[in-house]
Amino acid sequence: MTVRKVSLVPSALGRGVLAGACAAMFLASAAQAQGLKSYDSTKKDFWEHPPADWFLGDETQAQKGLAPDASPALPASMADLEKNLKAIKLPKGFKISVYADGVNSARQMAWGDKGTLFVGSFGVGTVYAITDKDGKKEVKPILKGLKMPTGVAFRDGALYVVDIDKILKYENAEADLDKMPEPKVVYNDMPSYVAHGWKYLTFDKEGRLYVPFGPPCNVCLAPTSLSQVRRINPATGEAELMAIGVRNSVGGDIDPRSGDYWFTENARDWVSDDLPSDKLNHIGKIGAHYGYPYCHQGDMLDPKYGKGRQCSEFTPPALKLGAHVAPLGMKFYTGKQFPAEYSNNIFIAEHGSWNRHKYQGARIMRVTTDPQGKNVKQEVFASGWLTGAKSFSGRPADILLAKDGSILVADDWAGAIYRISYGK
Amino acid sequence: MKLTRSINQVARCALLAGSLALCMTASRAAADLAAGAAKAEACAACHGQDGISPMAGSPSLAGQPEGFLQWQLVYFRSGTRKNEVMQPIAASLSDDDIRKLAAHFAALKPPPRGVNGAAEPAMFSVGQRLAKANRCAACHKDDYAGEKAAARTGGQREDYLLKALRDFKSGARTGGGVAAMADAVYPLGDEQLRALAHFMAHQP
């Protein structure tokens, strides 16, 4: 097996990566013919400050009003959370409860060795530590003023946090949560833009981090340092390219059976309500191309970038998850509390739609698969956070296994962590 | 002034509401508004007694979307948005304070039409074209009244609009979770920012 090493330049958007191909992102003449804006994407500046088109679409009459939802600014009250959870449907024998409230814009979660639950966040720039105090959960902001610290991971006593364009390491992180140590930058070859720059971190068994690098656009042929998943050794700063042709992947996990990385991927927007499907991918071979921006969902050529291409050139998804369901964090279930058939199943937190006239997702899916990624099926595990055609009571953003075999769910809309357990 | 209106609402509610439950909900909302009004006394010096700012560089808050107001206070409090005056004030606010303040300013009557005087036609039409080309209405709505986390830009002070646009452009302010405004404004030159501010100040 050949491992392709990434040739890493000091800046992720550095020299040599602006291949001539990206000038084709927006052909000025074609754009002008349609009365659209035109861009010069050959300059580094363009990729550091990408245009805002990804969330604005073309704004035709049919697309009008499909902009991303702003989540509530403040976390939901305990009374509202309890009311919301009454509407959540689960398989027989499971129940859901509030684990912690007041966790504004909660995203990825990670356990410390001493039982601290670390939680990243989106726009509020905060990392929280949740601990037990007098039989209650205490939610403490331990890091503030970071840029989109959505991703957190923990290993050998150290907390790792993504601060948009660098990965920070806080050694001995649980020693004093009121006074976090100065972090060390363990990796900084990352872009500084926000759009699809938010990311989760996943450790493999050997202590290397899987890190997605999304393109700062809806659909574009980005520089070769983007639209990919890297595997980074935080001890040495070395990175390997594990998957290319990947759009906005947020979460992933290691299959406990094979050690392979699986990851969710959010497909392009502005095609239609039902196309293309978001994806669950499996890295069966290193450096494979997953299709973006040429081919979506394994079998749909892009209306523009698909020209002269065939989907058979690319690695198809292990599973189509559905259009605009927005899969984020995912975990293989390795606990003992749930019935035996849940062993090694994948739970996926679906954040739910914005670019769809009637929202879907905002639920937790259960996926069964063999280690090779064959025979993959999904079913709804937890639902009920959609409260109308375009309204949520919550949006699942990540899943984490708890020591007792229950699972925790981070909700960045309601600003809370839930616990789903089985049995008594 | 606000307080009187709240009390009137309670009185009207007591007189007219057929349902007691409805009346209780409304009076609780009115009580919250009154609490917000009391809390907002301190804001008046810079943001105006009626939420319409008399001070250069300080925005009008009247009629801003509740979500937008809450978010800005949350950003000031968490240090994501930087401002020497607002950060220390926001640092002392609880979630509940933020809810009440936002409800108070959102319920105030937005700046009246023509609040910023007559528009300069040439500059206005440049701004109008820019607003269309940059699809400002996608988030700020067709009447620029804003919605959810997107600000009411129509009728805002022109000097403040220009300051906000320049702050987004320079990266001093990112514009929330998805950095929408920072991306939207980056390609525009200062002349264009001036025209946009002029156009927005004279909306709707």
Image: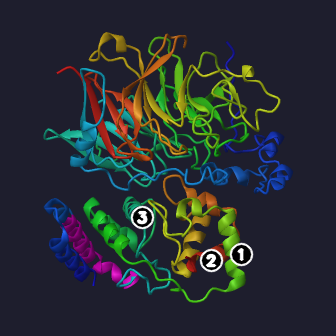
In this rendering, is residue A132 above or below B182?
above
Q: Residue at x 48, y 16 (%)?
A: A377
Colouring mode (rainbow / by chain / secondary structure / one colour): rainbow
Residue at mark 3: B72
Q: Nearer the N terminus, badge 1 or badge 2?
A: 1
Where are the magenta residues, as a range?
B26-47
Q: Mark 3 lies on which chain?
A: B
Disc 2 marks a residue whose amino acid type is: Phe
The residue tagged with tag 3: helix, strand or loop? helix
Q: Are marks 1 and 3 on the same chain?
A: yes
**Which residue lies most toward the right here?**
A29
**Residue A25, how many percent across, how many down?**
77, 44
In this rendering, is residue A58 above or below A198?
below
Q: Which residue is drawn at 77% across and 52% down?
A: A43
Main SS of the magenta part reads helix
- Camera-side mark, 3 or 2: 2
Badge 1 crowding class, 10 Å Cα cut-off, few under 14, some 14 to 19, many 20 or more, is some
Task: Kindly report the distance in space between the C-alpha atoms of the residues bearing marks 3 and 2.
Answer: 23 Å
For this view, does A33 lie left or right of residue A229? right
Residue at mark 2: B199
Residue at mark 1: B126
